[in-house]
Image (cartoon, rainbow, N blue to C red):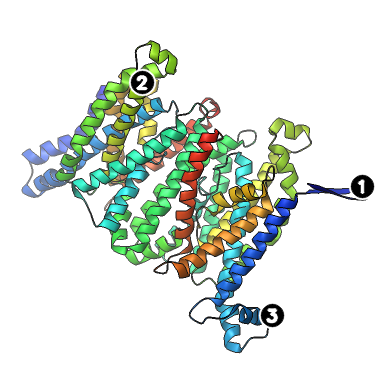
Amino acid sequence: MVSIAVGAKPIPVTDVWQALTHHNATEHVVVRQLRLPRTLLGLLAGVALGVAGAAMQALTRNPLADPGLLGINSGAAAAIATATALLGIGGGTGQVWFALIGAATVTIGVYAVGGGRAATPARLALAGAALNAALYSYVSALMLLDSAGLERLRFWTVGSLASADTGTALRVTPFIAVGLLVALATARPLNALALGDDAAHALGARPAVTRAAAIIAITLLCGAATAACGPIVFVGLLVPHLVRALTGPDLRWMMPYCALLAPVLLLGSDVLGRVLGRPGELQVGLITAIVGGPLFLSLVTRRRTARS
Amino acid sequence: MIVIRVRGRLSGRLHPRVLAVGTACVLLTTGVGVLAIGHGDYPMSPADVLRTLTGGGTAAEEFIVTQLRLPRLVTGLAVGTALGLAGAVFQALVRNPLGSPDMLGFTQGAATGALVVVAVGGSSAALSGSAALGGVMTGLLIYLVAWRRGVHGYRLVLVGIGTSAILTGVNGYLLTRVPLMSASRAMLWLTGSLDGRGWSDAAPLLTALAVLVPTLLACAPALRMTELGDDAASGLGVDVHRLRMLLLTGAVLLVALSAAAAGPVPFVALTAPHLARRLTRAPGVTLLPAAAIGALITVAADQLALHALPGQLPVGVVTGVIGGGYLVWLLATERRAGRL
């Protein structure tokens, strides 16, 4: 496990090392200015999305919960699009705050729909898809009204690490760090909640506080990740499933492993996108959709998941 | 409820309320239609419009009505009818009030088809054809992936959502691959617009409606029985799998062709059946009222976008915003009622 996590990341790192020590100044600049921030951002976003996915599946007790599928990333995207198109706020910390507001709204909405006992995976996914569609048409309308906005937003809405610079990475770091800490702190009580509210009470957990904390964590993680690199789907869904096969359902193990594996997946997709799309590149959001989509399909056509 | 029997052989049930709502919708749509034809840079009174439609107008009026405004109206009506009907069929098939083609990937498939043409730079006829093809191919793909000794509602939903997420990614990618001018054109198409639609745009959809509306209506009694559950329906003599395949094919064709005619007009397929059900208070599936309300929504939203709002917005913006608001309200109330 750990060796995979470390093994995939050194590819850029060795590049960095070689460029820094052996090669000329041009490559030096490329590595320092372009590759390094990009890798850093991929790491951060991957960690955020993976852990958020794990927290979400535990919170809604639903194997198909994913920040992208349930519209949380779209909520953040819609808020950012509003900020860019209507208020003229582009980039910077303002963008992160707007993303957080959007993500928080949708998280609470989805939880209100999906948290109930009656909500099956299919119903929750459908509610999320409906929200996604509504937000998507809203973003499209904004893009239609403002063609300069379209030029900026059409690249951002795919989900890309290409626009990364050190500033972006630094801006979202505190949000992701806080979100991560809150998520890890809720791992234990969320484990208890998996047994049901009454049993969790008996085990000393406070369901209301735990849920609120988990929602805050998900909001922070998803909002910051979306603000940094646009809405990326399927990472938050797949990684917890892969990890669950390795660690079992204990969230205290799952969350750290998700935090390791998710950036591997995201950076791997990004590298793949750069290799396949040469001389340009394929956006990482596209690669995760193309790689993650079929895995999602295989997941839902397995009888056990779909029936529950 | 009135039961009609003709010499003991043919029998049917008639809900007076369904009839009343249907008639009201048709009248209202006609009214909006006449106003729509009369409204514009060359204003005409409703009397003038009716006179021109019956063949008594001047040459100029004749041209404006039959060549400019009527095709747009008819396209809107046909698209609304098709979407309302397809939405009702989908919601009954997957047995969930949110199961509309917007959510299940068919619309996204049509969009992918259209975007491919925009990317390689084809004519608008090629764009329509490719959109229809994309929708149908997506329907086929979803059906094949979801098939396991028959297609069940929930699996269709999940496979549809997955496919839709993949295609959304692909669409976003295609949108980044084209120059800005084409991207604007693509964006306009993706929102759903009736601007500049002529008879040639409406013709394929009208043909399909002529064939598919009777077919789907003929399936309605059997569809009502499947609401009891697959086993009960089989017991009552319904070939559930064959029925599903037939309905699915019909609904996908309607969605694909309406997307080819006007782009993916969002949320009409979701809201029309809901409104139909609420207004008629009829049990089970209400195909015809849903179709009538779909037509009304589309035409009214187009007029609203064209004349009441600033800028020349496409119809899809209005249906999208209204539909989104309705969706939020629906999620809140259905959740409280425990039906979702």
Q: Tell me where residue B317 appears, x and y as whole percent.
A: 44, 59
Q: Are marks 3 and 1 in contact (CB under 8 Å)?
A: no
The residue lying at 49 percent from left, 31 percent from top is A121
The residue to which callout 2 is attached is A190
Tell me the SS state at disc 1.
loop
Quadrant location, the C terminus of chain B = top right
The residue to which callout 1 is attached is B8
**Amino acid type at image mark 2:** Leu
Using the numbered discs, state the Cα–Cα distance from disc 3 to disc 2 in whole angstroms: 70 Å
**Amino acid type at image mark 3:** Thr
User: Does mark 1 fall on the same chain as mark 2?
Assistant: no
- Classify mark 3: residues with Cα within 10 Å, few (<14), some (14-19) or many (20+): few
Using the numbered discs, state the Cα–Cα distance from disc 3 to disc 1 in whole angstroms: 42 Å
Q: Tell me where residue B205 appears, x and y as whole percent.
A: 61, 63
**Amino acid type at image mark 1:** Gly
The residue lying at 28 percent from left, 44 percent from top is A99
In this picture, is B54 found above or below A267?
below
User: Does mark 2 fall on the same chain as mark 3?
Assistant: no
Q: Chain of mark 1?
A: B
The residue to which callout 3 is attached is B54
Tell me the SS state at disc 3.
loop
In this picture, is B114 found above or below A22?
below
Q: Are marks 3 and 2 in contact (CB under 8 Å)?
A: no
In this picture, is A229 found above or below B319?
above
Q: Chain of mark 3?
A: B
**Closer to the camera, B183 or A96?**
A96
Position of residue B228 in the picture relative to residue B257 (left or right): right
The outermost residue toward the right is B7
Q: Are marks 2 and 1 in contact (CB under 8 Å)?
A: no
Q: Tell me where residue B304 appears, x and y as whole percent.
A: 49, 65
